[in-house]
Image (cartoon, rainbow, N blue to C red):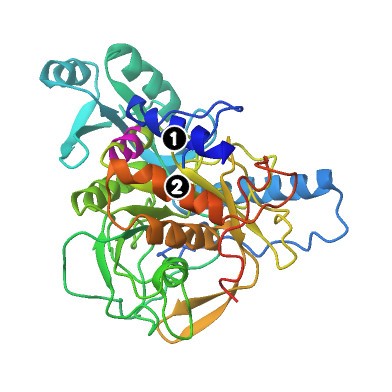
Amino acid sequence: MKYMFAWLLALCLLPGGAVPRAGAQVALPPVGIPDTGRILPGLPDLAGDTLGATEDRLRALRLDRIAALVRRHPDAIERDARGEPAVRGVLVAIGVDGPMIARAREKGFGLINRERLDALGIDIARFRVPDGRSLGRAQRQLAKLLPQAEVDVDHIYFPSGPGGALPGTMLATTAPGGPAPLGLIDGGVAAHPSVAGRVEQQGFARGAPAASEHGTAVASLLVGAGKVQGAAPGQHLLAADVYGADPAGGSASAIARALGWLASRRVAVTTISLVGPDNKLLAAAVSAAQRRGMLIVAAVGNDGPAAPPAYPASYRGVFAVTGVDARRRALPEAGRALDIDFAAPGDAVHAATGAASSGRLRGTSFAAPLVAGRLALHYPVAAIEAIGPAVAALVMEARDLGAKGRDKIYGHGLICGDCGR
């Protein structure tokens, strides 16, 4: 029960914004395109590796994945000043007005478009980088020119588990409805029998929604019923496809728009099994969704404990989930967030992989929906006053692993330990 008060304290901090968590802070609670630069490669056999060797190999895989994506789509994607992938030639800004846009135009930053996410109360302006300037240099210049605005690149986010596109596959669909307990931001969801008739989908990238193995798997682990059982079987799901057929899919702006749609539908719990860097637009969108009562569950990724902290899992108030194997050991490739909140099965997890297929999958992507599904059973309707009891119930449900009490590897412990079998 001692963790209960820490969770409630964190909940009280929600209106302050989704900011990176301090290391000692208590936490709140591939892809839909045929692109080998995005699909996570099979993990190497890590047996017998020392910890340092494992970290080195995972670090190399992460860098190779980024390099492959940029190399495959040089007209759509480039690196920012930190080497992270982002939409080529585009800067995003929030908190801008007409005079600020005019000032930017005078310095060569052409306005691409403006968009308001009404459900989140966020205005987004997208600017074109002047010819001949790197993304990093342009970001510094525009931020200096518009000091009252939040300026960032439009980062690209990767799935935290394997799975590519499913061309020509029928999408899982249902008639549009009202509020839903569960939301998903990922690739599109195929019409597997375990989820068919209970998934409403919306696209937030070119060519979306389009069925993907990764999105289908995560959806089945959320609401699957029948041969593939999810943690919240039979529930209605709103699925936002942020990849589609877009080379620059999975961007921060696409995820922000997806959060806006889910917030407008009063989704209670949203799963994001995607990882990438800290981003000002994504942080603002996460914070705004939380203030509407949405709880967000995110995977920590599969780039190893030496990788940079994963976002959105590292934002304050987001439930960061790691994966464990059948012996309840943390996956050696599991990434990290500034805090870990829960663990769930992440190895040989049985999930739908297409309209007529299923398989055993590995990755923290497939642990996150198990936690989200269980959380939604305690928190079926978005309501600030109901968060405390729902989080308390989930914490009490967790099976303690590792060091006694909450720890840095398993968080509060294992959720849904027999799920995905």
Residue 12's quadrant in the figure? Answer: top left
Residue 346: give x, y in percent of width and height. 61, 63
Q: Is residue 7 left or right of residue 292?
A: right
Residue 187: give x, y in percent of width and height. 38, 62
Name the one closer to the observer, 83 or 389. 389
Name the one closer to the observer, 167 or 363. 363
Q: Residues within 10 Å of mark 1 (few under 14, many from 20)?
A: some
Q: Residue furthest left?
A: 98
Q: Which mark is residue 8?
A: 1
Q: Is residue 300 left or right of residue 88?
A: right
Residues shaded magenta: 284-290
* Residue type at tag 1: Leu
Pointer 2 and pointer 1: residues touching (CB < 8 Å)? yes
Residue 420: give x, y in percent of width and height. 56, 73
Name the one closer to the observer, 339 or 249. 339
In this view of the protein, can residue 264 be seen by the observer?
A: yes
State the residue at coordinates (49%, 53%). Answer: 394
Looking at the rendered image, the quarter that the N terminus falls into is top right
Q: Is residue 27 magenta?
A: no
In this view of the protein, can residue 157 be seen by the observer?
A: no
Q: Nearer the N terminus, badge 2 or badge 1?
A: 1
Dot 1: element? helix
* Residue type at tag 2: Val
Dot 2: element? helix
Q: Residues within 10 Å of mark 2 (few under 14, many from 20)?
A: many
Looking at the rendered image, the quarter that the C terminus falls into is bottom right
Q: Which mark is residue 256?
A: none
Q: Which mark is residue 391?
A: 2
Residue 146: give x, y in percent of width and height. 27, 15
Above or below: residue 189 compared with residue 140 = below
Above or below: residue 253 compared with residue 34 = above
